[in-house]
Image (cartoon, helix red, strand yellow):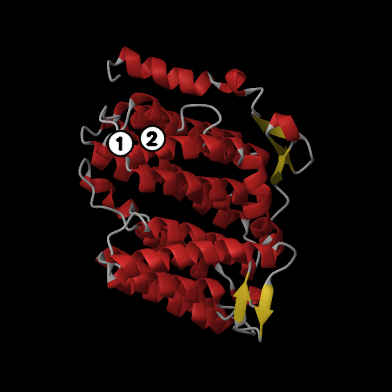
Amino acid sequence: MTALHWLVSGSVALGSIAGFTLIQRQPVQLFSVIYIDGLSCFTLLIAGLLMLSLPGQWRRIGQLVALGLAMFSGHLMGIAVGLLGVAIFSERWPNRIAGAVMAAGYGLIGFRATSWHLLISGNGLNSISFLLVLAGVVMMVGALDLPAAPLPPSVDPLATVTGLVALLRLFSVGPWNLGWQLAAFVVGGTLGVGTAWYALTSSDPFAAEEWITRSLSGLAIIAIGCASSAGVVATGLLFGHLTVRRLTQPAAGTSRWAGWLLSGAVPGTLGFVALWSASAAVMAAGVAALAVVVWATALLLMVAGGRQIQTARRLASTVGAGVSLGLGIAAPALSRWLIRPISDQLQGGLTPYGAIEPWGWAGMLAFDAGSRIAATAPGVVLLLLMGLIGALAWLISRWCKWV
């Protein structure tokens, strides 16, 4: 079973990378039933990598197959069945309920629309269907476990990714109104700050890691709510940071330098770029107050990640730290090749609130709707100038005698 698990995971990840070469210019559509775009390939790439961190079980393979159905379906019924399948194979009952709720949301869209085909069902999207999908996402990412602090149950990473992608896929149906964006901001901000605080105050490293996963999911909901290409880029980078942490398991032990590289506090690492991109997306959307919430969440996450460092050296965490640094420096190129197709192909449902553009040695720039620079991410030359947040996290940790 373990060999089959690894074979399926590796095949899906490699197949998704190969798929990016097909969809760079435009999605692949077959008979209006099969629809393969950047979101499909990126989701299965992340899911295949996350599978490597999970024990070999038939239910995991079933989840991956169901997620593939949801991602490759150009028919709303196929998406609903796929979401329900991922939930059924999950071992947690809240996830199963969430899958049914999200499937009902997509089913309602098709019932009200003139067509069940994904790209021409925009007139079926209303507040009820949106709130059903959003409520399902909240349950999928483990937000209902907030009263269970300080020992939350383990999240299902495949279910978490499925829920967030189901929310992002709504942009293929049609644009969101301001009320829906506000709902995503409120839910994501509450989840992000609350769980980041639990991560900071938790005395158990594994419990803190579970809260960190939930907090990153909250930031992803905020980024999705920006309804812009900048938000899509931020969501993709947050997925990448979450995946690296799940694969390396820093709570099981890591050297200090590797633990800090994985925490997102060090400029140039994938975590730092992901947290910066979430704030930049919000600033490009013109919601400055929410940007403060995002930065507060980022600071709590950095300190929480540094506080939970266990000084037992592990090869996985050491390699993961190097990967995080390499992916962070290469983020502009990766964003252009892996994430830009997602925003380009969801453009019909995105609003012109901002974009994140690769910009040579300067790293990445976030532009607002007026094409003015809203934020800048450092390139290799400017890394030392952007170390304020990381240095602040380190000083707080030293002051509290956590490191």
Disc 2 secondary structure class: helix
In the image shown, does 168 or 338 lie closer to the viewer? Answer: 338
Q: Residues within 10 Å of mark 1 (few under 14, many from 20)?
A: some
In the image shown, does 216 or 321 lie closer to the viewer? Answer: 321
Number of dots carrying numbers:
2
Residue placed at 66% from the left, 29% from the top? Answer: 379
Residue 319 x %, y %: 41, 38
User: Is residue 97 at least partly visible in the picture?
Assistant: no
> Quarter holding the N terminus?
bottom left
Residue linked to disc 2: 318
Residue placed at 62% from the left, 81% from the top? Answer: 117
Q: Are the two marked residues, 1 and 2, in contact with CB atoms closer than 8 angstroms? A: yes
User: Is residue 30 at least partly visible in the picture?
Assistant: yes
> Quarter holding the C terminus?
top left
Of all residues, the one furthest to the top in this rendering is: 399
Residue placed at 54% from the left, 27% from the top? Answer: 267
Residue linked to disc 1: 314
Name the kind of residue labelled 2 in the image.
Answer: Thr
Residue 293 x %, y %: 49, 34
Disc 1 secondary structure class: loop
Q: Residues within 10 Å of mark 2 (few under 14, many from 20)?
A: many
**Left or right placement of residue 377 versus residue 294 in this view:** right
Q: Residue 345 occupies which quadrant of the picture? A: bottom right
In the image shown, does 59 or 116 lie closer to the viewer? Answer: 59
Name the kind of residue labelled 1 in the image.
Answer: Arg
Residue placed at 25% from the left, 66% from the top? Answer: 91
Q: How far apart are marks 1 and 2 (CA)?
A: 6 Å
Residue 364 x %, y %: 68, 36
Of all residues, the one furthest to the right in this rendering is: 371
Residue 13 x %, y %: 49, 62
